[in-house]
Amino acid sequence: MRVAIIGGGAIGLLFSYYLKQEHSVVLYVRSHSQKMEIEANGITVRNQEGLFHTYVQVKFISEWEEDEADLVIVCVKQYQLESLLKDMEFIHGQPSLFIQNGMAHLNIIDRFKLNHVYVGSVEHGAYRENGHTVIHTGIGETKLACYQGRNQKIVNELVQTSNPSFRFCFVDDYKGMLQKKLVVNALINPLTALLNVENGMLIDNPHYYQTFTEMFTEVSTILGLDDEQLYFEHARQICLNTAHNQSSMLKDLEAGRETEIEAILGYLIAEAKRLQVEAPLITALFHLIKGKQLERGGK
């Protein structure tokens, strides 16, 4: 299968490396320096078993050609998505898988006439060390769900050719899948970013854990979660499984990059307003993260 991957961040590099083992992969990036780096060095993945690398074709996004791929995997951050879809109208008719945190990207997708849209939830731990190297800190799986349209052949091929270290799993309920990931992102990312701690500290420190549980209460109320204990234990277990990891939001703040706070807590605040539900803790954390971004020259 011909797979086009858009975005050269940690997830884009991780997908490119593993999918290259079974498929024809082209990685699309914006940065000239990253393109040169990948062309010279290939993509390197470091995990607990060692260092591995492969070469993939890499192009600028502006070099996209019509009918380039059987599947387009969009790995850019949520705040980059709208401008990308405006610039790349020619991908609108192709089967596409969107890998973004939060749920705000669904509103963006709805504004464009896309066919055969899938959404994904990535449960791997990964961060980018440089332009061509990704550190695979935790093996999970990528859950896929149909959002609109459907091409079962593509889904089957992804699932059936899964690497043991990079599995795909199809689920029927896209909303439940994304909500489960949103709960994890909402509880872990802002708190670890503000407190400058690894994920496990949210459980180990009783004062942080108290805030963690209070955050969950607000999130659960906004989302109207039916099985609260299931969602809470899932988020708690993620903290334990990734105890020594730093969240992506903490890494973004440290690097002076824009965070995905709008896609995560911003979405929840908008939902709270729509439902006329109070969310004081979520709102406070949202503005504190935005303030940290502003300190570092962001917006």
Image: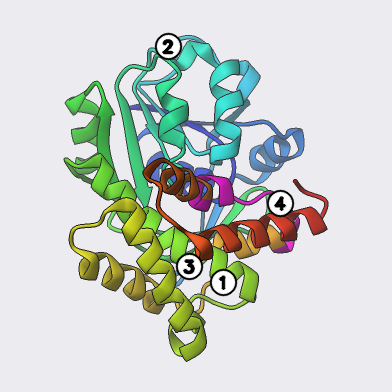
The residue where tag 4 is placed is 257
Front of the two marks 2 and 3: 3
Q: Of the residues under marks 3 and 4, which one precedes in the sequence?
A: 3
What residue appears at the point 37 percent right and 63 percent down from the top-left corner? 139
**Residue 298 magenta-drawn?**
no
Nearer the viewer's eye, disc 2 or disc 4? Answer: 4
- Nearest the eye: 175 or 277: 277
Q: Is residue 271 left or right of residue 254?
A: left
Q: Residue at x 62, y 17 (%)?
A: 63
Counting residues from the start of the chain, the first of labels 2 and 3 encountered is 2
Query: Toward the viewer: 66 or 259?
Result: 259
Q: Give the number of the mark in front: 3 or 4.
A: 3
Return the residue nearer the eye: 102 or 207: 207
* Tag 2–tag 3 contact (CB < 8 Å): no
Pointer 1: residues within 10 angstroms few (<14), some, or many (20+)? many
Label 4 secondary element: loop
Residue 143, image x, y percentages: 28, 48
Q: Which residues are magenta?
A: 254-265
Earlier in the chain: of badge 1 and badge 2, it is 2
CB under 8 Å between callouts 3 and 4?
no
Give residue 188's mark: 3
Residue 97's disc is none
Q: Within 10 Å of the Cα at label 3, are there few (<14), some (14-19), or many (20+) other Cα atoms?
A: many
Where is residue 79 shown, x and y percent of the image? 59, 38
**Do the residues under discs 4 and 1 have CB atoms within 8 angstroms?**
no
2 and 4 marks in contact (CB < 8 Å): no
Q: Which residue is mark 2?
A: 67
